[in-house]
Amino acid sequence: MATDATLAGSASGRQMARRLFWLASISGLLAVAFIGDILTGPAFLNVFDVLAALVSPATAEDPTTVIIVHSIRLPMSLMALIVGASLGVAGAEMQTLLGNPLASPYTLGFSAAAGFGAAITILFGFALPVIPSMTIPVMAFLSAGVACLMVYGLAHIRGITAEVMVLAGIATLFLFQSMQSLVQYLAAPEVLQEIVFWLFGSMLKASWFSVSVSGVILVVSVALLLPDFWKLTALRLGDERAASLGVNVGALRRRVFFVVALLTAGAVAFVGTIGFVGLVAPHLARMMVGEDQRLLIPASAICGGLIMTGASIASKLLSPGAVVPIGIVTALVGVPFLFGLILTGKQRHW
């Protein structure tokens, strides 16, 4: 018996070491990608000048480079990382809550609602009295909150179960998508162009303020998830097994549901709709570290940040001198992954 326990402990230790190695590896890869994102851009700046402006702005020779790096490129790169991490964590929790490998933050219609809020604001052109530049992000955030309340209200009537939440989310998703289409139909051509550009998603809208707000939302949301890590891990065994271990499944779903809504709204309110990151990142993380939420959450955040940072680099390289909307790039990456997930039908990591 002692020998069996020793062997089991040794195997568990090796497994944990392997998972921590993967976590450290993707963290290093994210750091490299982040620097690469800052170095690339439509301005064709010299790499060494950019590094000098980034490391020591006070002694940099070209003040224009310093302004571009610290006022444009650095906020865009940080925003890509934060948005990717937020969507990665939200996607991991959505898949855990719903027990569905194809679940993502968009399953419940939050992103479609945020898009509708932004679209209707652009259509009617109204602005907040004190902070007019924040009108679109605020309306997008509030609209995502309305979608959250709708899904929760519908699910609460029938019971907070995975099936009911999926159905309520799909209904909310189609409602707000149809309202988006109506707004686009009513818009004049120049207004329609602005709406479509916002819906594509772009890091060009990033600023130090948006970085601060979305970053705080990400930190607070992860902090709210910390006490429930072991409960969420148990939930992957099924509702009945989790309940037998003392988990209040309904209360857990309610808490995590609101955290997912907060993460999604904070991610898309400033930069527009970003697709597939919340679907792809958790699967990549799960392949490397398994279902233990203590590792899955940080791995999903890192994978999400890595996907968004890579997409940000690609969006600047695809069309020299311009920046392709990042939502298009993430879709180009996410669609083949989704096809592969459907066609292979492998359940080894689910």
Image (cartoon, rainbow, N blue to C red):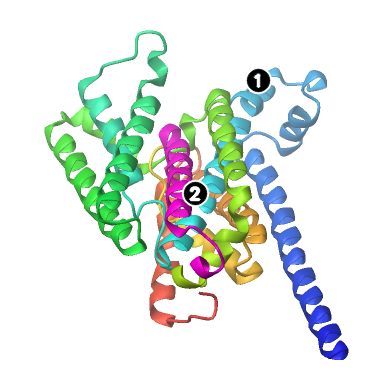
Residue 336: which quarter of the image? bottom left
Tell me the residue that label 1 is attached to: 64
Q: Residues within 10 Å of mark 2 (few under 14, many from 20)?
A: many
Residue identifier under label 2: 87
Using the numbered discs, state the Cα–Cα distance from disc 2 to disc 1 in whole angstroms: 33 Å
The stretch of residues the image draws in magenta is 242-271
Relative to 26, does residue 82 appear above or below in the rendering?
Answer: above
Q: Residue at x 31, y 15 (%)?
A: 127
User: As shown in the figure, which amino acid type bears the numbered disc 1?
Assistant: Thr
- Image x and y of residue 223, in percent: 62, 42
For discs 2 and 1, the disc positioned in front in the rendered view = 2
Name the residue: 40% across, 41% down: 201
Image position, residue 350 (x, y; %):
50, 74
Q: Secondary structure at mark 2?
A: helix
What percent of the width, then of the height, locates residue 263?
48, 42
The chief SS type of the magenta part is: helix
Residue 160 vs residue 42, the one in the foreground: 160
Where is 324 relative to 122, above or below? below
Q: Quick check: 314 above or below 164? A: above
Q: Tags 2 and 1 in contact by the CB under 8 Å rule?
A: no
